[in-house]
Image: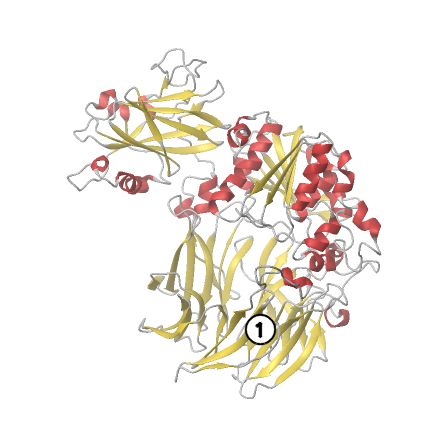
């Protein structure tokens, strides 16, 4: 059964020819019984599913074997059974937002599920009616029926709400992605490799309609050589740490510290509740080390006196100290007694010292913070100050001295590699240094290495495995300390989500990540050897989908820089057609990486009928220090040029893009860019800003991290000494130039970019009688992370673009006409 079937309104109710597209009527159209697949269901009980008081729960369990399965079975037209229950499977493909009613006839009981989500029904004249609202894509419609007396009378009908509400019941060769699938699919969230490289603690999670915003965790101890699970935790254990000899695991469960003997699997609860424990690690094979946090009440319920700019942070008044715990006698001991916020950086191999960083309040110089690096002798508590730094990310012990990750200006500019003397370094561009134990000698190790370093993982021989931002990829490198050179680890993904390294003479790496065109996979590899696949999420959650259709597309801007980009093409792409397009960017000093999914699921947008162009404008890290330095004191000056130039050339060089139907969107700094672009060009037909900055001064003064981020983005510039920067680069001051329909989205609890940034722009555009929408997500912060609001958030901006770029307002009206 491969003929095309499109079903809408029909003037001949109950009659449908395969391949026919039916016209407008107020009556339902019968879905061809040859297009309905039937399978028996397993009911070992003498009670039918619909006879139980738990019918909904039972029906959910009965459909599980068919989720993410291709339509198969017998045609309803050929089905005959003595059983009164069965599962009907109807593929429904739609090329736009569609609304309609699915009618189930001649079944006394029924339940309908769309992509695993149950749809509530109602009885009308003895038939069950289910109202469906289908987003662009391929939908798996499962109908569980019971109480059937005559299978020849069972019929499914479709009644569209309007003439465009047409569904295609052809079984697709490859399914398009859908939103719930991308959010719910199981992913590896953490790996922790044993020092001997034999075992890995492997944590995965998934979501579901039934569990809503709560992730379902799976934590296993996995033996790499045998590919076997040797232990599985029944509850949400966390903070796993391996003993140096690989024989024990420490972890937290229910705020209690536990250890496990790896050989026997015996688990011992070591302590009562230790709330707010973090940075769990081993000092030696008999002693654990960690930090414990105490929190002071911020106010008495009436007033709060702010002690510092940082006091707006809800964690500023937390006091952390370092503790040890002896497994031999169960003694808990405090090591430090330091004021302020501290972080445990590393423990020395001999077990005598600990490396700690302390955050200080100090606004004297950009970026208006100060970190003190300390070494503490555990036995005596003696504290030695190694140095105080304006830029600092991470420190680890090295065979001689320390490894430190910090910005180019660390060590009085030891890491600077700027070719343009007029530029100021961007300290988000992480560099690697070797520092002597007294802090006097700083040696840059990555000055000629363009990728930005985000994390270092030492190996047993003093080398490092380094996680980097390398253009728009997240890449692992092996740093050979003796050679002073970086070598790329064999990596078959574009973006590393999590990684761990062993302490063997030849280190082993376990990592999980995605390609831009394929979902997450987990691998392991010995340094210098090829990677071996452990798990591919496509086998679980994406069996019916194809790899995404993507292309690389770069251009050279007017300054001679290569601006890297990529294109995502629609489902069943036809080069001879013209498509609407979406342009996405960030601009806030980190590139938009090549994740398969995430907060901005480019592959989903493409499957919804859009060409998607993602570019990396000037100012991003990972492309060299000159490129990232142009983020400083620019506030979009170079970035707007790149986006406008890139979009125009993208349209000119791709005839399949409809120049009149191009939209743009960005979030945070990207939301600022969206507003700023709207004041400078009418190139775009619709724009979306999520959590964007409209007025730089108000963000600088009110956002939790506004003054700190501005310490790099506006280094040395303030409203009193550089008023033109704050005035001329703030979109709000030029709102009267905006002509593009603009959607503003914000979480009402956003602490990073306060929601007033969107409200001010909304007020201005309303006063100017411009086309503007403001949608605020209640209880959400800077990012929309929880499942239920995330799915609505995706719908909101895609419905907005469908309205303005496809002339299809129905989805937007469905979501917001009555809100």
Quarter residue 314 falls in: bottom right
Residue occupying the far left of the picture: 46
Q: Label 1 belongs to which residue?
A: 345
Horizontal side, residue 812 vs residue 706: left or right: left
- Asked whether the viewer can see residue 436, the reply is no
The image shows residue 785 at horizontal and vertical percentages of 52, 49
Residue occupying the far front of the picture: 302
The correct choice, above or below, for 297 with respect to 441 in the image is: above
The residue lying at 64 percent from left, 83 percent from top is 384
Quarter of the image containing the N terminus? top left
The residue lying at 57 percent from left, 76 percent from top is 462
The correct choice, above or below, for 106 with respect to 234 in the image is: above
Looking at the image, what colour scheme do you see? secondary structure
The image shows residue 742 at horizontal and vertical percentages of 66, 35
- Asked whether the viewer can see residue 239, the reply is yes
Report helix, strand or loop for mark 1: strand
Category of crowding for the residue at label 1, using alpha-carbon neighbours closer than 10 angstroms: few (below 14), some (14–19), many (at least 20): some
Horizontal side, residue 217 vs residue 342: left or right: left
The image shows residue 116 at horizontal and vertical percentages of 37, 39
Residue occupying the far bottom of the picture: 380
Q: Nearer the viewer, residue 478 or 723?
A: 723
The image shows residue 798 at horizontal and vertical percentages of 56, 35
The residue lying at 71 percent from left, 34 percent from top is 765
Numbered marks: total:
1
Residue occupying the far top of the picture: 11
């Amino acid at each position: 059964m491969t003929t095309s079937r499109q079903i809408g309104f029909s003037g001949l109710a109950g009659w449908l020819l395969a391949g026919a597209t039916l016209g407008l009527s107020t009556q339902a159209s019968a879905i061809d019984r040859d297009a309905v697949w039937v399978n028996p269901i397993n009911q070992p009980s003498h009670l039918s599913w619909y006879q139980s008081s738990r019918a909904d729960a039972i029906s959910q369990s009965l459909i599980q074997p068919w989720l993410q399965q291709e339509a198969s079975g017998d045609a309803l037209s050929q089905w005959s059974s003595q059983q009164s229950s069965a599962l009907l499977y109807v593929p429904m493909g739609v090329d736009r937002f569609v609304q309609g009613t699915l009618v189930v006839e001649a079944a006394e009981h029924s339940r309908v599920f769309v992509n695993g989500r149950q749809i509530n029904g109602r009885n009308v004249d003895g038939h069950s009616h289910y109202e469906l609202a289908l987003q662009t894509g391929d939908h798996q419609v499962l109908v569980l029926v019971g109480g059937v007396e005559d299978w020849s009378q069972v019929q499914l009908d479709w009644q569209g709400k309007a003439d465009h509400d047409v569904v295609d019941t052809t079984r697709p060769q490859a399914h398009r992605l859908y939103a719930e699938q991308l959010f719910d699919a199981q992913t590896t969230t953490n790996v922790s490799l044993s020092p001997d490289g034999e075992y890995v603690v492997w944590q995965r999670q998934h979501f579901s309609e039934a569990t809503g915003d709560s992730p379902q965790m799976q934590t296993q101890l996995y033996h790499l050589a045998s590919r076997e699970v040797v232990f599985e935790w029944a509850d949400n254990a966390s903070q796993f740490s391996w003993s140096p000899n690989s024989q024990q695991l420490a972890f937290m469960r229910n705020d209690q510290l536990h250890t496990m003997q790896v050989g026997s699997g015996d688990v011992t609860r070591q302590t009562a509740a230790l709330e707010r424990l973090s940075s769990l690690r081993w000092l030696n094979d008999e002693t654990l080390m960690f930090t414990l946090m105490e929190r002071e009440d911020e106010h008495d319920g009436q007033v709060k006196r702010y002690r510092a700019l940082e006091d707006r942070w809800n964690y500023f008044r937390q006091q952390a100290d370092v503790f040890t715990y002896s497994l031999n006698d169960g003694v808990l001991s405090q090591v430090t007694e330091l004021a302020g916020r501290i972080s445990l950086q590393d423990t020395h191999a001999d077990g005598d010292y600990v490396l700690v960083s302390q955050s200080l309040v100090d606004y004297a110089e950009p970026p208006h913070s100060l970190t003190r690096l300390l070494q503490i002798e555990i036995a005596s508590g003696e504290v030695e100050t190694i140095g105080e730094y304006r830029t600092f990310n991470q420190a680890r012990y090295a065979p001689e001295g320390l490894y430190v990750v910090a910005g180019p200006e660390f060590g009085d500019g030891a890491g600077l590699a700027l070719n343009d003397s007029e530029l100021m370094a961007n300290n988000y561009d992480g560099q690697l240094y070797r520092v002597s134990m007294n802090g006097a000698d700083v040696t840059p190790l990555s000055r000629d290495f363009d990728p930005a370093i985000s994390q270092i993982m030492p190996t047993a021989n003093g080398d490092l495995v380094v996680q980097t931002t390398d253009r728009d990829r997240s890449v692992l490198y092996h740093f050979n300390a003796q050679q002073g050179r970086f070598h790329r680890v064999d990596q078959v993904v574009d973006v590393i989500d999590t990684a761990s390294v062993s302490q063997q003479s030849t280190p082993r790496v376990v990592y999980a990540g995605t390609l831009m065109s394929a979902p997450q996979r987990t691998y392991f590899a010995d340094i210098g050897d090829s990677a071996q696949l452990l798990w591919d999420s496509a086998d679980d959650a994406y069996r019916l989908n194809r790899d995404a259709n993507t292309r690389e597309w770069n251009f050279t801007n007017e300054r001679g820089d290569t601006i890297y980009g990529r294109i995502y093409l629609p489902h069943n792409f036809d080069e001879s057609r013209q498509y609407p397009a979406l342009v996405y960017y960030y601009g806030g000093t980190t590139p938009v990486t090549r994740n398969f999914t995430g907060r901005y699921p480019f592959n989903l947008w493409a499957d919804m009928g859009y060409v998607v162009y993602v570019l990396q404008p000037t100012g991003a890290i990972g492309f060299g220090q000159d490129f990232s330095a142009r983020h400083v004191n620019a506030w979009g000056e170079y970035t707007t040029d790149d986006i406008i130039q890139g979009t125009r050339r993208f349209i000119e060089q791709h005839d399949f893009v409809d120049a009149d139907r191009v939209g743009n969107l960005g979030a945070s700094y990207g939301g600022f860019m969206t507003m700023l672009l709207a004041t400078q060009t009418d190139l775009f037909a619709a724009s979306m800003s999520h959590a964007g900055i409209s007025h730089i001064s108000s963000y600088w003064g009110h956002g939790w991290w506004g003054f700190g981020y501005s310490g790099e983005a506006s280094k040395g510039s303030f409203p009193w000494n550089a008023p033109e920067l704050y005035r001329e680069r703030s979109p709000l001051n030029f709102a009267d130039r905006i002509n593009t329909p603009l959607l503003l989205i914000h979480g009402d609890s956003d602490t990073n970019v306060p929601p007033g940034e969107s409200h001010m722009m909304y007020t201005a555009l309303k006063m100017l009688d411009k086309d503007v929408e403001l949608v605020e997500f209640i209880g959400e912060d800077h990012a929309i992370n929880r499942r239920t609001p995330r799915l609505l958030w995706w719908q909101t901006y895609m419905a907005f673009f469908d309205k303005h770029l496809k002339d299809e307002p129905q989805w937007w009206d469905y979501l917001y006409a009555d809100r």
